[in-house]
Image (cartoon, rainbow, N blue to C red):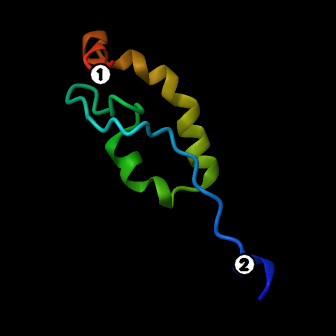
Amino acid sequence: MNDQTARPPAPIKTPCIKVCVVDGESGLCLGCYRKLSEVAGWAKLAEAEREAIMAELPGRRSLIRPEKLGMLR
């Protein structure tokens, strides 16, 4: 048995906070601010693609009306 088969793969980084509610206006998840297509394809994306999306997420928060975000907290 070599080292590659002995270790499980590293977990994939994700911004998911287990609040999966999609805002109809912005198309973004109210929990992590990803688009549905990004959530659905997350595991298939390259690490660099996931990192690029994660870097955009804080700025996406402003695309959701504040009162909608307040409902979750």
- Residue 72: mark: 1
Q: Residue at x 33, y 28 (%)?
A: 30
User: Residue 32 in the image: x percent, y percent?
Assistant: 42, 33
If the image is split into quadrants, where does the C terminus sit? top left
- Marker count (numbered): 2
**Position of residue 23 in the picture relative to residue 44 (left or right):** left
Q: Is residue 59 above or below residue 23?
A: above
**Position of residue 43 in the picture relative to residue 51 (left or right):** left
Image quarter of residue 19: top left
Q: In terms of secondary structure, where does tag 1 sit? A: loop
Q: Give the camera-side residue of 17 and 53.
A: 17
User: Residue 57 in the image: x percent, y percent?
Assistant: 49, 29
Circle 2 residues within 10 Å: few <14, some 14–19, many ≥20: few
Circle 1 residues within 10 Å: few <14, some 14–19, many ≥20: few
Look at the numbered discs 2 and 1 and tell me whether their residues touch, using CB distance below 8 Å: no
Q: In terms of secondary structure, where does tag 2 sit? A: helix
Residue bearing mark 2: 6
Q: Amino acid at mark 1?
A: Leu
